[in-house]
Image (cartoon, grey):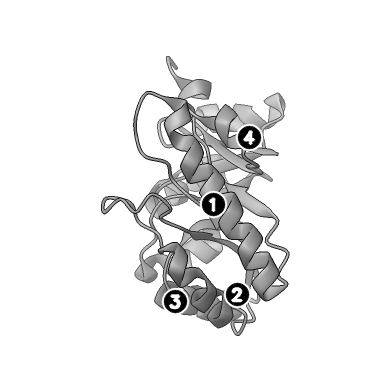
């Protein structure tokens, strides 16, 4: 299981201290924020940068330059643009497909019923490496309310592996309030910010 430190609320001075604490995976919600922080740090500092927020296709080129993994792939159009840009930079970009398990209109991500069709299309894009799935649980105070979403994502990944023979090893799910439940349901990547940086 990998801890992704969500650094949207902290500056580059704090990020620079994280490798000394054993934290090397950084999550940012916005391309511009990652660009500014990496510039202030003088480079990525050997950190592994994760794009965890909604990504617009017009930011694909910047995302390929700045991030080592995109958690929030949610359309074929975005996938095609990321693949095109990754080809230009001669890299294979690891991506996770964001799935809207809860069906909330306020959440981005594809419906579970669309996953098979998108995976079929992604297997034809040579510069993307599909590593797994990502989901956001509904907001609320009860961590147990997140369990059905996390269990649903795990089950969806199992069905997708069987249908495609892709390994899909990664499940990105769980944040500060519910990461323990996410781990119980099979999370391999948890995105934690508040629990790490509150009060700084």
Q: Taking the image as drawn, is residue 44 in sight?
A: no
Q: Secondary structure at mark 4?
A: helix
**Residue 19 image offset from top left, x and y in percent:** 68, 32
Q: CA distance from mark 1 to mark 2?
A: 32 Å
Residue projecting furthest to the left:
105
For the point 58% across and 38% down, the residue is 190
- Image depth: mark 4 or mark 3 in front: 4
Q: Secondary structure at mark 1?
A: helix
Q: Quadrant of the C terminus?
A: top left
Q: Which residue is mark 4?
A: 183
Mark number displayed over residue 89 = 2
Q: CA distance from mark 4 to mark 3?
A: 29 Å
- Image depth: mark 1 or mark 3 in front: 1
Q: Quadrant of residue 160?
A: bottom right
For the point 40% across and 77% down, the residue is 77
**Residue 107 image offset from top left, x and y in percent:** 33, 51
Pick whichever of labels 1 and 3 is earlier in the sequence.
Answer: 3
Q: Taking the image as drawn, is residue 115 in sight?
A: yes
Q: CA distance from mark 3 to mark 2?
A: 20 Å
């Amino acid at each position: 299981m990998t801890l992704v430190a969500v650094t949207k609320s902290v500056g580059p001075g704090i990020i620079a201290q994280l490798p000394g604490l054993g934290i090397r995976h950084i999550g940012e919600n916005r391309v511009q924020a990652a660009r500014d922080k990496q510039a202030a740090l003088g480079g990525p500092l050997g950190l592994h940068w994760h794009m965890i927020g909604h990504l617009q296709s017009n930011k694909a080129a910047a995302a390929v330059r700045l991030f080592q993994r995109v958690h929030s792939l949610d359309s074929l159009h975005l996938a095609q643009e990321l693949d095109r840009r990754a080809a230009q930079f001669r890299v294979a970009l690891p991506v996770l497909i964001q799935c809207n398990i809860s069906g909330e209109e306020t959440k981005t991500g594809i419906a579970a019923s669309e996953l098979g069709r998108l995976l079929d299309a992604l297997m034809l894009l040579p510069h993307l490496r599909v590593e797994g799935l990502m989901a956001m649980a509904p907001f609320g105070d009860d961590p147990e309310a997140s369990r059905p979403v996390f269990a649903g994502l795990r089950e969806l990944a199992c069905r997708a592996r069987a249908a495609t023979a892709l390994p899909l090893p990664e499940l990105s799910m769980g944040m500060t309030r519910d990461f323990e439940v996410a781990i119980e349901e099979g999370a391999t990547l948890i995105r934690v910010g508040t629990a790490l940086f509150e009060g700084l």
